[in-house]
Amino acid sequence: MIKSGLKIGIVLTLILVLPSLFFSAYEISNLSKNEAVIDSIYTGQLESVLFSLNQYSDDVLSGWANQLERETDDIETIITKNYSIDAIGIKGVSGLELFAKKKIPDDSINSLINQLEIDFASNLKKIELLRRYVNNGYRKIEALSNSFPHKSLFAFAAKQDSVQVSTVLLLLDTDKFIRENLGPKIQMVAQDRFYISVYKENGSLEVFANINQGVEDKNIKQKKAIWLLPGYELGIQMRGNTIEDLVRERTRTNIILLIVMDIILLLGAWFVFKNIRKQIKLNQLKTEFISNVSHEIRTPLALINMYSETLEMGRIPSEEKKKEYYKVINIEANRLSKMVNKILNFSRIERGKREYHFSICNLNNEIETILENYKQHFDQNGFEIELKLADKMPELNLDKEAVAEAIINLIDNGMKYSADVKKLAIGSSIESAYVRIQVKDFGIGIEKKDQPFVFDKFYRVTSGNLAHKAKGSGIGLSIVKHIMEAHNGKVELDSIMGKGSCFTLFFPLK
């Protein structure tokens, strides 16, 4: 049976559990890949937003360059209209012509021109490249390194005529440019879906944000440099759940679902395995039951057959011997009848068709009747009976035949498993709400590990030499338990190995 159960367990594991575990392991290993794909999709979307903002800032500067090329006579108007432009310089053959905001003091104009000349000289390579571009029909705006704090200096080349090329310098207040030009565009792009911020100094300082840090917590990690503004970055993050939150939540959900599925399959496999193992054990017990019953029935049948044949053939000369044979035949027939009745009663119990006929009776009287009927059986087997009955036994509503069957089953077990001390102690008592009937033997006892199972059908204790040799069907105690349940009572066992067992029947007073 153990080997069969082990095989079934292995098969169930292979069929149900292993595929699920392999699938779970595969899914968990693929989660990181799947989340990487999701992350790359979100990253691509966010980068496209950042790209559009970068493109917009480039378009703003290109628009100013177009205006300057068309309206060179009205440069001051362009400066006035654009809050972020501090100065515009045109560098030609004759030198640097500067147009500045009116708020700049006159005494600062010369120092501003000198500083622009210095920055112009330090960026000659870039400027020469810009001039070469414009000669080839392509205008490009380039950010120049400068010595103005919090300012950005841009340059592009413009043709004055077919020969002369001048360089236009744009000096911008960077923070003002971001707020005046990029701010509205950021607000339009962000709407209620994103946090978008502009940072400088390697992301340590926030210059502009569509939502202030104090209003909602932000943890922007997706950042891109602004093409035309060195040292400045655009950062973006989804509002509500971030990419990391979405990925983490999805991963956690998938793992939990996989674990739950695995647990359900494991429990299902364990349940199926347990029931199959129980069924195998039950089938084995049934096989043993049939074997034991066949053996027990064969013994009285053989005796009856042998004695009846001897009598039939007339080989017994004396009447006294004949009476002895008749007596043996009668005893074995009664024994056989009891076995058959026990099996039939068990069959009715199994099918739920056993009927009980209740009537008012006194348990003390029933016990005395049983012992009187069994007196010859006790004497033949050398058993001493110690009887202690309660003085005043209340009458109870019982099925006398069923209760007698339960008590007889306990007596038979006590005699069967008694070794050297052939003694039974039978008694009755009243305890709180119950009438107790005790049948105690002084035999081999029952091990602790077997005690929880002795009332199960077909279960037989086989540990120990005497228990192994003793024959039985394994249904006696199961019948006792059913009879007590039909009387709303219970049966309990108290046993010590080597000292005997005591079975107690509890009958409710009401």
Image (tube, helix red, strand yellow):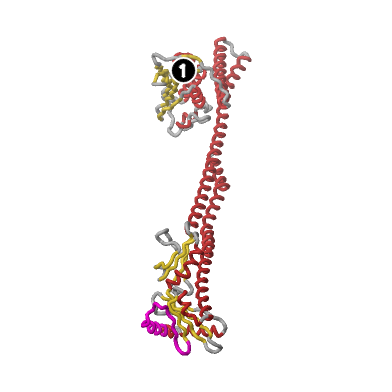
Q: Residue at x 40, y 27 (%)?
A: 499
Q: Residue furthest top?
A: 319
Q: Residue at x 55, y 85 (%)?
A: 135
For residue 289, above or below residue 301: below
**Does 286 sit above or below residue 258?**
above
Q: Residues within 10 Å of mark 1 (few under 14, many from 20)?
A: some
Q: Amino acid at mark 1?
A: Phe
Q: Quadrant of residue 498?
A: top left
Task: Let me know if residue 106 is in the magenta part.
Answer: yes
Farthest residue in the right direction? 313
Residue placed under numbered mark 1 in the picture: 378
Can residue 424 be seen here? The reply is no
- Residue 364 picture quarter: top left
Q: Is residue 217 magenta?
A: no
Q: Quadrant of the N terminus?
A: top right
Q: Quadrant of residue 298?
A: top right
Quarter of the image where the C terminus is located:
top left
Segment colored magenta? 92-117
Q: Please, what secondary structure does the residue beneath circle 1 have?
A: helix
Q: Position of residue 335 (x, y in %)?
A: 54, 19
Q: Residue placed at 53% from the left, 47% from the top?
A: 261
Determine the residue positioned at 58% across, 23% down.
Answer: 353
Residue 417 can be seen in this image: yes
Counting from the top left corner in percent of width and height, residue 354 is at 56, 22
Front-lying residue, 360 or 30 = 30
